[in-house]
Amino acid sequence: MMQPVTAVKGIGAERALELATLQIETVQDLLEYFPYRYEDYRVRDVSEVEDGEKITITGTVYGEPVVRFYGAKKSRITVKVVVDNVVVTAIWFNRGFLKSQLRAGREIMLSGKFERARLQIMVSEQHFLDTERAGVQEGTIQPVYSTTGGIQVKQIRRFITSALAQFEGAIDEILPDDLIRKYKLASRSDAIRNIHFPESVQAGKQGRRRLAFEELLLFQLRLQAYHAVNRQSRDGVAQHIPLEKVREFIHGLSFPLTNAQKRVVKEILDDMQASYSMNRLLQGDVGSGKTVVAAIALLATVEAGYQGALMVPTEILAEQHYETLSELLTPHGIEVALLSGSATVRKRRDILSGLQSGLIQIVIGTHALIQEDVYFARLGLVITDEQHRFGVEQRRILREKGLNPDVLFMTATPIPRTLAITAFGDMDVSTIDELPAGRKPIETYWVRHDMLDRILAFVRKELDRGRQAYAISPLIEESEKLDLQNAIDVHAQLSQHFAGTYRVGLMHGRLVPREKEEVMQQFSRNEVQVLVSTTVVEVGVNVPNASVMVIYDAERFGLAQLHQLRGRVGRGAEQSYCILIADPKSETGKERMRIMTETNDGFEVAQRDLELRGPGDFFGTKQSGLPEFKVADVVQDYRMLEVARQEAADMVRGEAFWSSPQYRALRAYLKQDEYFLTKIKD
């Protein structure tokens, strides 16, 4: 199966080069190049067809075709076709060249969308059966593949037909017999044949079901095996935490912990005291109190005699965390440092020296913290905030700094369970699903642009009460391509509107860190009452006095981003408001606005976002944390994903998996990963 694709009859060196552009280089690649849809050539009776359904019919051309031209190069050709004594009108667009071929009396097969009321078919494909019968397998379901360059779909069909004839017997089974019987799965070879050339719709579904389950199981198996081996290896730091010191710290806080915070603190401290390396995700909605949980974990590691590091995605967030953690931890004699990219050479040298000597116990910074020149005397805990883009490989690199510290990943982006167990299946997950007492739900309103005067009057009313406001724009400067409000224009408009009464600040991604910090400090001190910004305030900015969030052109933002922006207000005791200014043209845009006004629950927003956008766009198109499955879809196949995860977890926990011959193929799959080469004896 790993032979070069030229081993397939009919594929020479030239064709092999073309196939390589589709990442098809071996026989296995070819057989696992699955179709993305099918053409149904099963001939249907028009009396049984639903309106709008795609069908294939055969009939006889009747009468002369009529061609009408409109526009520069556009045309419409119609002809009557007799199908089972019913006259159907066949319609093609921009296919004027067919006129000479549509001769009365010719037998023709048509595929396309059928309009029942008008008895007409919008033709997408046609075959003249007197000359093209060999070009279509009448009565079958034919696969359609993604193609590029000189390769055509019918050639890929031919190559795969040839490959199956030669190599079907060499397709090895990878799943154990008991799993195949338990879930009534097709064999691997039958599934591959049926997904390419199904004899029926049901056979195609069974082929897809088997291959989707296999794909999800293999992915989950890798995650669960990594999790199990990590725990079994006992190579972590078993931190001896003086719990009375931790309790003393918690009792000294100016607010009580929620029950959810207490629960996750216990889960984290239990992991830190165990002899395996902690590998935990802490997720909680905006404002749920993850930072204080991080402070407790950092205090615990220092009290146990270790150092802690907090890694965040932006310098603004690093500076905010530094201020918060210094305020919480410095009174307890803990030395906290900020390692930022804007630090002077001397400052950086002093911090690196302090970390290496152990004088600095907690360091906060961006991903520069894991650069090669950063050494710790005794690193016990690494916390990363909002780094949900870290995939399994990056997480492993972080751990394999040679110190095996406990690792806690935090995110304020609520992740639907289906994605959490896909992207973070190798981790334990803690969830803060409760907001601190006294937090009022943010009131969210969707308004049109023509209500701007009323919105600004409302903002002024809040400012008169001593509150502050954000105004968010999707662009920095005016764009000729997009007719959207931009931050610079909004800043000019609002500065004029509030002139003489309130100050308006401007922040965006093109400002240097020092300028951003200056604007944020002014807003934090209430020297600036309205902050116009792009989405650089999306994560981590904390100004409890801000009570209004106005988002211009809100339809330009994703649901998760809108929810994050909304979370910048509602951080104090006062009632807060989020106003979405949007004139969405698409149904998806309108649905986003409706969802935002219906719920404040970040997990519900995330689930609806996943359903609207799909998994590929939830984290962004190039996320290393999410695999690109060939067959499976984590939204549609979420129940299958749950089953695959449970089966994988059960397998790696049992002795049989690591020694029994029936699991040899799965162990061989794991050993393709270098990490497992030395861990699995076979």
Image (cartoon, rainbow, N blue to C red):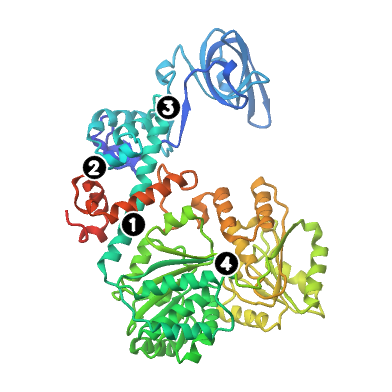
Callout 3 amino acid: Gln
394 or 670, which lies in front? Answer: 670
Label 2 residue SS: loop
Question: Which sits in the foreground, 375 or 295?
Answer: 295
Look at label 2 and name its amino acid. Met
Q: Which residue is mark 3?
A: 142
* Residue 224, label in figure: 1
Number of marks in picture: 4
Reply above or below: 513 against 156: below
How far across and down, in percent of the image, does residue 513 sit?
55, 78
Residue nearest the viewer, comparing 655 with 587: 655
Q: Is residue 30 visible?
A: no
- Of the numbered discs 1 and 4, the one sitting upstream in the chain is 1
Q: Find residue 14 and report its image quarter.
A: top left
Q: Residue 170: image x %, image y %?
A: 22, 35
Is 86 left, or right, of 152 in this rendering? right
